[in-house]
Image (tube, rainbow, N blue to C red):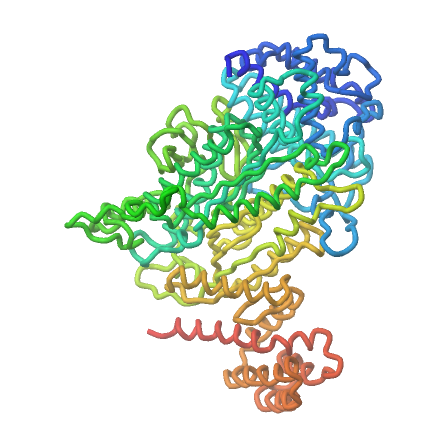
């Protein structure tokens, strides 16, 4: 781009981001029903800040973009596109209007400014998901509240609707907070750096507009303003790049565009689980510390990869339309050079992954063209989910050719690429990974025992308990290398090297100390149980539910809990589609749904562990899944809390969780423990999903409360071990009846009555509980007693585990 085009590009991108924000700023002072002149409000803001905007944009053009923003349907001709006399400016106004229309998924003329400003409550996007059943009516709405740090519960849950005046008062107060934060940036930003200006406006909208409805004329709205404006900005960036590069930036060409101006790229970091849990020994820096470092490294690796892609295509931060769990989606202009650029990026990344990780990790990139109709607009609209379907298929093909660009070429396998550098003759193998030569000391007072990468794990693991800031650099700096980039963690931005590409604040939305640099915030679930001084607990400490002193032997077991959302691929590919209008299959909704899932699994899970389950280790949690390591004694409470919160979050019976739990000793190698949890989760999935598998028993979530109550009752009663062992045998006999209809299985009930009479004292809580099990009608096995009998083996084994842990602790 020429310098003039660069400034114009920045103006279009920023103008599109702030396209619909002015009306909300105006609403902080006026009655919402009087707001029909929001284009004038936008013009007033730009005029008042003209000297600031002029440092990084074309202020004249920005005024035009915010004022002449309507293609049709506005009673004041001043605000219509046709009032723009400069043909080049008119083309740019039309381009931004098209971006707005594509983001909304609505046809031209859908919005009628003459109707005035009406702000409905924001209903959960999950209420729109329909796979098999009827349409779901939301029972609540999201309150207009800003995202803050995690000292309080994230406001992600729907609430019963407020009455009109209460909602209006709360909304106006929130708009005042938004306006105050917006105005506060005026004298704080480095206006000479567009990247800083754009990043801070984007982050401000993320903070204040995530729970504000974007559609101000519908009776109900499910798209947050933040997701709508960031998609509008991303589309405007792509359309401008496309028309400038193809020399078609004219009003006529934009009115009659080709069908395939846009593309979507997906990135996926593969091999995460193999890398994350390939820690070969308990020593050499501590498993918990290295595991935390590797989990964090993988999250930052995905961030840097996405930033590299944005840099390669000269796109702003908002073009990363979805990102979570090691995956990201970036909106691109569909230009002739796209395939070659992606191929170059793929080869560069594969070369680095092969050299640094011997192929354990790798990156897969895939892309597909996107038609305008797939945004839900035009004469024959389709839907954006089919774009995701094509892209997932392309990504699957790329995964089948893992490292193919560096291990093979048109002539066949490149044998030399398979060879790694031999160890130095005097070197020993790294005790942590067994892959590379040992070069560093994991303990400053110890011997050389770990390779450079595992040493970085140890060092990063020591820094993370106090880390609040991450800086990303497109060059070598002090920190952790990813490709030719570096990320550095710190407790304060003043500790970072200068000139970062981006600075990310962790689990806090306050960026006021970083307004001079490009900055954003991110919620990460990286909680680790620790002492007040920050020293982390080991897995033995977690199992014992307290920090062990030197020489103290740990007791207890760990519960490794793995869970994810059921049928997630179908949810994204089919859940918003409808055969008849209205369809909800738009990019803005899919992006909002992805972001809100991630809010639950990152922000809310981190808050829950910090406040309610401080003894639980978050190995990872984000996107749509999690892996937690908890003390076995608290696992049932944790599972119940997780499932109840998820149901309250989505408020849709077609969106469910499955979970698997493995109970293990704390010194068992990580790879094995996670495999056990994987198998448990798989069992829960293959038996119908929306279930939990624990101790090899698959149970419906609705049985969990009865199971937990029964476990607590038995633990209080402390019955003889002979009674518990007999219950185990009787539970197996009962299953012969329930699963195979063997009449012999019915002997379990009279035998249970005999066992009760021999082992339990009449009148006790446990006696009354057990007696009800004998009395319930077998020919009508419903209700609480039936659930207890069906899960009697699981209940008893759970109690026996706790008893054995106590016995282990009493041994010398």
Q: Is residue 215 visible to the viewer in this orientation of the structure?
A: no
Seen at 54% across and 21% down, the residue is 197
Q: Position of residue 14 (x, y in %)?
A: 60, 21
Residue sitting at the far front: 411
Please tell me in which quadrant of the rendered image residue 557 appears.
bottom left
Q: Residue at x 28, y 44 (%)?
A: 452
Picture quadrant where residue 72 is located: top right
**Nearest the eye: 46 or 130:** 130
Work out whether 241 lies above or below 542. Answer: above
- State the residue lying farthest toward the left: 426
* Image position, residue 254 (x, y; %): 68, 21
Above or below, comparing residue 399 to residue 796 in the picture: above
Quadrant position of residue 550: bottom left
In this rendering, the count of numbered labels is 0
Quadrant location, the C terminus: bottom left
Residue at image coords 58%, 15%: 8
Please, which residue is most extreme toward the top here?
A: 85
Residue 365 lies, with reference to residue 435, above or below; the image says above
Q: Is residue 485 left or right of residue 132?
A: left
Q: Position of residue 356 (x, y in %)?
A: 33, 44
Check the image and report above or below for 47 versus 266: above
Place of residue 122 in the rendered image (x, y in percent of width and height, measured from the top left): 73, 39
Q: Nearer the viewer, residue 624 or 344?
A: 344
Q: Is residue 103 visible?
A: yes
Q: Name the residue located 70 percent from the left edge and 44 percent from the top edge.
A: 125
From the viewer's side, name the closer residue of 175 and 431.
431
């Amino acid at each position: 781009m020429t310098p003039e085009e660069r400034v114009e590009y920045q103006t279009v991108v920023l103008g599109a981001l702030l396209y619909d924000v002015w009306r909300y700023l105006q609403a902080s002072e006026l009655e919402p029903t009087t707001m029909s002149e929001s284009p004038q409000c936008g013009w007033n803001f730009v005029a008042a800040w003209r000297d600031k905007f002029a440092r990084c944009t074309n202020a004249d053009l920005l005024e035009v973009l915010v004022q002449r923003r309507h293609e049709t349907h506005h009673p004041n001709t001043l605000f219509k596109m046709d009032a723009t006399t400069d043909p080049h400016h008119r083309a740019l106004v039309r381009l931004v209007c098209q971006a707005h229309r594509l983001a909304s998924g609505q046809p031209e003329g859908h919005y009628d400014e003459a109707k005035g400003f009406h702000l409905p409550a924001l209903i959960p996007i999950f209420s729109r998901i329909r796979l098999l059943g009827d349409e779901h009516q939301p029972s609540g709405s999201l309150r207009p509240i800003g995202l803050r740090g995690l000292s309080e519960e994230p406001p992600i849950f729907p609430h019963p609707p407020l009455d009109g005046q209460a909602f209006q008062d709360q909304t106006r107060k929130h708009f005042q907070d938004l306006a105050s934060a917006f105005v506060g940036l005026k004298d704080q930003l480095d206006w000479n750096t567009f990247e800083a200006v754009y990043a801070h406006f984007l982050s401000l909208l993320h903070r204040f507009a995530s729970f504000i409805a974007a559609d101000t004329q519908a009776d109900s709205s499910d798209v947050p303003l933040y997701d709508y404006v960031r998609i509008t900005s991303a589309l405007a960036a792509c359309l401008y790049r496309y028309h400038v590069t193809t020399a078609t930036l004219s009003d006529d060409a934009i009115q009659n565009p080709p069908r395939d101006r846009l593309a979507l790229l997906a990135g996926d970091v593969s091999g995460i689980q193999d890398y994350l849990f390939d820690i070969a020994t308990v020593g050499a820096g501590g498993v918990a510390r290295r595991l935390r470092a590797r989990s964090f490294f993988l999250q930052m690796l995905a961030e840097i990869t996405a930033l590299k892609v944005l840099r390669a295509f000269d796109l702003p931060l908002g073009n990363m339309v979805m990102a979570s769990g090691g995956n990201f989606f970036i909106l691109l202009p569909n230009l002739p050079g796209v395939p070659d650029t992606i191929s170059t990026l793929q080869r560069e990344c594969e070369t680095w992954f092969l050299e640094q990780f011997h192929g354990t990790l790798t990156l897969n990139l895939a892309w597909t063209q996107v038609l305008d109709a797939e945004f839900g607009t035009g004469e024959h609209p389709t839907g954006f989910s089919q774009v995701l379907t094509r892209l997932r298929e392309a990504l699957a093909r790329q995964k089948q050719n893992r490292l193919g660009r560096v291990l093979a070429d048109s002539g066949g396998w490149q044998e030399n690429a398979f060879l790694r550098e031999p160890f130095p003759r005097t070197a020993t193998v790294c005790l942590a990974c067994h892959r590379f030569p040992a070069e560093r000391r994991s303990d400053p007072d110890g011997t050389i025992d770990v390779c450079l990468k595992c040493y970085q794990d140890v060092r990063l693991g020591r820094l993370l308990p106090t880390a609040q800031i991450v800086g990303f650099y497109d060059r070598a700096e002090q920190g952790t290398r990813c490709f030719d980039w570096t990320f550095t963690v710190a407790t304060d931005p003043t500790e970072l090297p200068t000139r970062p590409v981006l600075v990310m604040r962790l689990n806090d939305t306050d960026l006021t100390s970083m307004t001079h640099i490009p900055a954003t915030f991110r919620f990460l679930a990286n909680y680790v149980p620790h002492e007040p001084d920050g020293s982390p607990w080991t897995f033995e400490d977690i199992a014992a539910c307290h920090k062990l002193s030197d020489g103290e032997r740990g007791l207890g077991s760990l519960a490794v809990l793995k869970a994810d959302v059921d049928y997630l691929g179908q949810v994204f590919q089919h859940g918003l589609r409808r055969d008849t209008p209205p369809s909800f299959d738009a990019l803005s909704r899919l992006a909002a749904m992805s972001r809100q899932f991630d809010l639950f699994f990152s922000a809310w899970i981190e808050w829950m562990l910090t406040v309610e389950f401080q003894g639980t280790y978050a190995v990872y949690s984000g996107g749509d899944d999690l892996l937690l390591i908890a003390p076995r004694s608290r696992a049932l409470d944790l599972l119940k809390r997780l499932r109840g919160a998820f149901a309250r979050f989505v408020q849709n019976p077609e969106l469910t969780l499955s979970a698997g739990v493995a109970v293990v000793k704390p010194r068992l190698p990580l790879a094995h423990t996670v495999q056990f949890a994987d198998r448990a989760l798989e069992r829960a999935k293959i038996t119908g999903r929306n279930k939990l598998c624990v101790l090899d028993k698959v149970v419906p979530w609705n049985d969990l409360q009865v199971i937990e109550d029964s476990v607590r009752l038995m633990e209080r009663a402390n019955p003889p071990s002979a009674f518990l062992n007999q219950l185990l045998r009787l539970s197996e006999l009962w299953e012969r009846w329930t699963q195979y209809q063997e009449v012999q299985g019915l002997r379990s009930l009279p035998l249970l009555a005999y066992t009760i009479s021999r082992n339990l004292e009449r009148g006790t809580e446990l006696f009354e509980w057990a007696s009800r099990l004998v009395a319930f009608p077998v020919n009508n096995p419903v209700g609480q007693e039936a659930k207890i009998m069906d899960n009697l083996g699981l209940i008893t084994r759970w109690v026996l585990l706790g008893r054995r842990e106590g016995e282990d602790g009493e041994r010398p």
